[in-house]
Image (tube, helix red, strand yellow):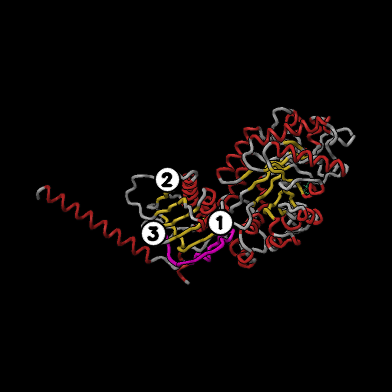
Amino acid sequence: MNSNLTKSLLICLAFVALLSCEAEKKKRVLNFPKTDLAMENMIPKPMKIIPTNGGFALDEFTAIYTSENASGFPEVGQFLADKIRAKTNLQIPVNVNEVPNREGIIYINQSDSLELDAPEAYQLYITADSVILNSNTAEGAFRGIQTIRQIIPETSNDTLAEYKVWTIPTGKIIDNPVFEYRGTMLDVARHFFTVEEVKKYIDLLAYYKYNVLHLHLADDQGWRIEIKSWPKLTEVSGGTEVGGGEGGFYTQEDYKDIVAYAAAQHMTIVPEIDMPGHTNAASVAYPFLNGNGKKIEPYEGTNVGFSTFDTRKDTVYTFIDDVVREISEITPGPYFHAGGDESHATKKNDFNYFVEKVQKIVNKHGKRMIGWDEIVTADVDSTAIPQYWSSGDNAKAAVRKNLKMILSPAKKAYLDMQYDSLSKYGLHWAAYVPVDSAYVWNPEAYEGIPLKNILGIEAPLWSETIETFDELAYLAFPRAIGYSELSWSTPENRNWENYKVRLANQAPFLDRMDVKYYPSPLIDWKKSKFTYEEIKKD
Ligand code: TNX
């Protein structure tokens, strides 16, 4: 046989092989089990889901592409690839030029559609050939890839091909959150949590489309952030905490690291320095701050309401100006939380005078002031954001002043409330908050607060009774998952019976993330999703 003939034969054979491979792939597509995108376990529930009952094959031939020159989009693509790898072990290339044998494409596209003209809006079109995610912003794209992560099955359909295939149900998703502020708070003052622990919490929250993490950085028991102009704050009061443990604090570099880590997941850090009450630790470091007239000693108990700054001393405001300035300089987000709760040792007039002065300082450093609901008794300006935690009267006053509020009603949204009387951790001064009670309420109609006065929802986790990540996880999960839906999804899309099933199916994710959630008996927890064999039977 001459060599030319051999060559043509080989080419021909290769071509036939390619064709049959194509045929094989088509067959595989046709053989997909019927899917139903609307039945997937997405939390928070997207605004609109239109299933088309087919399947997109996520496999080793899939590639991710993102819009060219779209700021933040390649990072979103890479984030998705990393998470796909963690879940399936597939190594999906991102924006690779020369890709032979690429079949299925995930395309993350920056659109300029007016329909998507909201910072976190996205649309997802899934067909047998491609997954197209459209968003005008990288932030919206980032929320959209959480949806993709959630609909990639836990297990592959190994019977379909020689290689592993994860079937993503086809259809269309149109999504946009109800509230722009969707947060949780972590109290790192009563017990300290390390940078690594905070990062792990951020990873979990981002999966459920949270966009705010509020850090309660100072309280009676400890001061947790380095202030370069007042070094004793952390030198003296970084080492105390509830129960006498060793405490801890973030250097400014640590804090920047947390802020950057959160920003990469399109999450804003809200720093809180609680004052004029809850300030024993600051006054231990600098006794001139103290305004309660008593001798100052470190405090490692759990009482509240005994400490106060001296609100009539100019040097106290010089101190606050430095603290707010240093923290604001390393906080890219728009907010600074100045506390203001339970200042029982501060006279009413002094309290109002203090809050008004602090708001001016916060504004001077380019931030909007958030404060616990008590701040509405002061003459705050229209940019102030009260955080409603207990007083209905304060909420009403905020509405009269036409302020935007953050809803954190303790009896519904406090993550540190015990689930029931048997709960290992937590308090119950506001209520026992079982998983259903945490979910079944309507922020849009809470105690007559008009929707236009609600910036969003935040679920605070106070840490008097918890000191390890597992203890944090016990209180935060699964309830934090429900609050993500309350703050993202429309009331029509929320339903306890339906949510319960989707929540049960979070177990494989939480297990994989090594999260020791509270296995509420109200939920029929799924240890793993149905295997392909099981789906086939019905
Ligand atoms: C009330 S809520 C507090 C905190 C406690 C919490 C415990 C609020 C603004 N103040 O100081 O840690 O209760 O649940």
Let me know if residue 52 is in the magenta part.
yes
Marker disc for residue 129: 3
Element type at mark 1: helix
Instruction: Give the camera-side residue of 361 and 299.
Output: 361
- First-in-chain label (3 vs 2): 2
Let me know if residue 197 appears in the view: no
Q: Secondary structure at mark 2?
A: loop
Disc 2 residue lies near ligand 1 with CB under 8 A: no
Measuring 81% from the left and 44% from the top, which residue is drawn there? 302
Closer to the camera, 49 or 467? 49
In front of the other: label 1 or label 2? 2
Residue 277: quarter of image: top right
Report how far apart the C-alphas of labels 3 and 2 lie in the structure.
21 Å
Residue to which mark 2 is pinned:
68
Question: Residue 400, position in %: x, y?
Answer: 78, 55
Q: What residue is shown at x 84% (from left), y 38% (from top)?
A: 308
Image: magenta residue range = 36-56
Residue placed under numbered mark 1 in the picture: 508
Q: Residues within 10 Å of mark 3 (few under 14, many from 20)?
A: some
Residue 479: x and y in percent read 67, 56
| Disc number lying in front (3 or 1) | 3
Cα distance, mark 3 to mark 1? 27 Å
Magenta region includes residue 14:
no
SS under mark 3: loop
**Spatial separation of the CA atoms under disc 1 and disc 2:** 35 Å
Q: Earlier in the sequence, mark 3 or mark 1?
A: 3
